[in-house]
Structure formats: structure tokens, C-alpha cells
Amino acid sequence: MATNAIDQTRRMLSLVTYLRERPGAHVQDVARAFGITEDELISDLDVLPMCGTSFRGGDLLDIDTDGDRIWWHNPDDVAEPLRLAADEATALLVAARAVATLPGLRESDREALLRATAKLETAAGETGAASSRLSVTFESEGGVFADVDRAISERRRLWLRYYSPARDELTEREVDPIRLFAVGHTYMEGWCRLSEARRTFRLDRVAEIRLLDAPAAPPELELRDLSEGLVHPAAEDPEVVIEVTTGGRWVAEYYPHDSAEELPDGGLRITLRTPDPASLRRLALRLGGEGRIVTPPELAESARTAAREALAAYDETL
């Protein structure tokens, strides 16, 4: 079962200590110790070799696995006392100050971060003073993440203005958040009061968010297993094939799909399944000359008819 980014980071920090003390540990034993699946553990192990004591690319964790056992080849090198270069200290201080300004950050976390920042400034000396002249502004998703994380922690309901690509519209809704998780993008799973059903919201599609005073009270739900992806279309759902040019490649980014094959002209042949193929007619109209529905043929003809009607209505207004 997928966890949110914060939980995964905490687990990976503990995993480093665990593996250092257990050279050659078995994958099955480590996964059981951390209460995760072997696939989730392997996913963590794929990330750890990109971590280390320097962002320059050196001193990274040399950890690998043969699928049965896990080996860490340079634990002593990484365990040496950390000495930050001037640019590393500056980057760390600027990032810490930026995170401390995030809306929705728990006050206890903010205070702990500020204490750590003050200690680092003292140790950095003149470098710490120079870093105070730099600042970072987070894009909207950072604030959305903080608000959702706070709502989950405080068990509060959220109000959202959310963009739905399938309908190409913004909707307003109240949501009882359940969890944050990452599958390619960062998502919130929650109980939507508008549809009275469980829904998943991609954070970069949240146009506006507000914490409400109403308590969150989602029904008791079994969390979905997301280890094989976010969307699992039913086998009986109709299959739709769409071909897009380079200007329509964004469809593969916004619509869950089974496959996206490269075309010789730089476009994509996208195969997806949906219980309501007619809902994709709007997508075909948005694409215009940048894409077309290939199958099913009745949906392709329906999209062409809708396009002709839209053009005729446009001509009548001229």
C-alpha cells in the first residue's frame, strides 16, 4: 500500500540505520520488519543510491540488491563526520527558511526547524549570514500540500476549487481528507461531499484550497493498494484509442492510460479504458487538429459530428 512522501522519507532514514547494522540482510526480512511489501522496499532501494552527503554527485549511498539480499558497500565512508561546503550550507539554509514559511506547517515542526536552522547558521559563520540575503518562493502545490497535511493532522474538512480535465471545468467541493500519497504526482485521497464517494485529487490541479472548521468524518474505508498504479480500469470497460500530435502529448500526462506508443511524427497513440467513452468527446473537441479518436468508430463519428455542429454554430454567429 502506498504511503505519503513524509512517511516514506521517515522510513528511508530508518532503513539506512537498519541496513548499516545488518549487512547482507534478506529482502523478505527487511520488508517484514518495516511492515511494507517487497516491491515497496525495492522501490526505496532504487531511491537510496541517489542519496548521500553531497549534492555534487559524490559520496552517494552504494546500496544494491540481487533480489534476495541487500548489500551496502560504503557505510564507513558515509558515516564520516559531515563537513558542509559553503554552497551546500547556503542551499540548506535557504531551503530550511523557505520550508519554515509554508502555510499549514504544524507549529511544533516549524519551531523545531527554526531551532535547527539557528544552529546551522552559527556553525556556518559568514556563509550563514550571506544566505540570509537569498529567498525561495514555493509554487502553489507546496502550499496545497501543507494545507492538506495540516487538515489530515487536525482532522478538518477542506474546501477545494478543483480542475477536472475530463470535464474541462473547475468544480467547488468539500472533502474529508484521508491520506496523501505519491504515484508519479502527489495526490490526496478523500471523501468527497459533492459526489458522496471516495475520490482522488491531484494536488497540482487544486486551484484554491481552504481549511474549514467542520471536522473531517470520512466513512470507514479500506485503503486501496496502489502498488501497481493509481487507476485500475475494469476489464469490461470499453477501450478507446486516441492518436495525438506533438501538441497533444499532454493527454498522456492528464489522462490515466494503459499505454502510450510513440508515433514517427513525434505524436502518441494512447490506449485507455473508461466506463463512459462519450465523456472523451469533449477531449476530442479540445484537441482539434492535434488529435483524433481512432476507436471505437462510433465514438470517433460522434466526435466528428459534434465538431461539425460546433463549426456550424460558429459560422452562424459571423
Image (cartoon, rainbow, N blue to C red):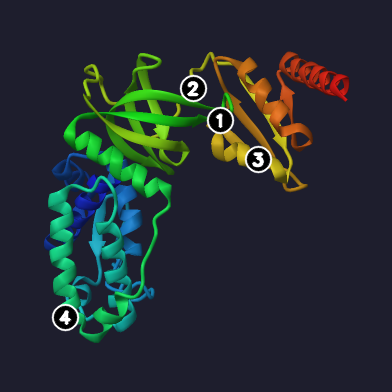
In 3D space, how far apart are the residues under numbered discs 2 and 3 (Cα atoms)?
Answer: 19 Å
Q: Quadrant of residue 82?
A: bottom left
In 3D space, how far apart are the residues under numbered discs 3 and 4 (Cα atoms)?
Answer: 53 Å
For disc 3, the marked residue is 261
The image shows residue 91 at horizontal and vertical percentages of 33, 72
Q: Nearer the viewer, residue 283 or 150?
A: 150
Q: Earlier in the sequence, mark 2 or mark 3?
A: 2
For disc 1, the marked residue is 165
Q: Is residue 235 above or below residue 139?
A: above
Q: Is residue 2 visible?
A: no
Q: Residue at x 54, y 15 (%)?
A: 275
Q: Residue at x 11, y 62 (%)?
A: 21
**SS assignment at label 1:** loop
Q: Quadrant of residue 197?
A: top left
Q: Residues within 10 Å of mark 4 (few under 14, many from 20)?
A: few
For disc 2, the marked residue is 233
In 3D space, how far apart are the residues under numbered discs 4 and 1 (Cα atoms)?
Answer: 49 Å
Side (left or right) of 267 relative to 114 = right
Side (left or right) of 156 relative to 158 = left
Q: Is residue 133 above or below residue 105?
A: below
> Quarter holding the C terminus?
top right
**SS assignment at label 3:** strand
Q: Earlier in the sequence, mark 2 or mark 4?
A: 4
The image shows residue 94 at horizontal and vertical percentages of 31, 69
Mark 2 and mark 3 in contact? Answer it, CB < 8 Å.
Answer: no
For disc 4, the marked residue is 123
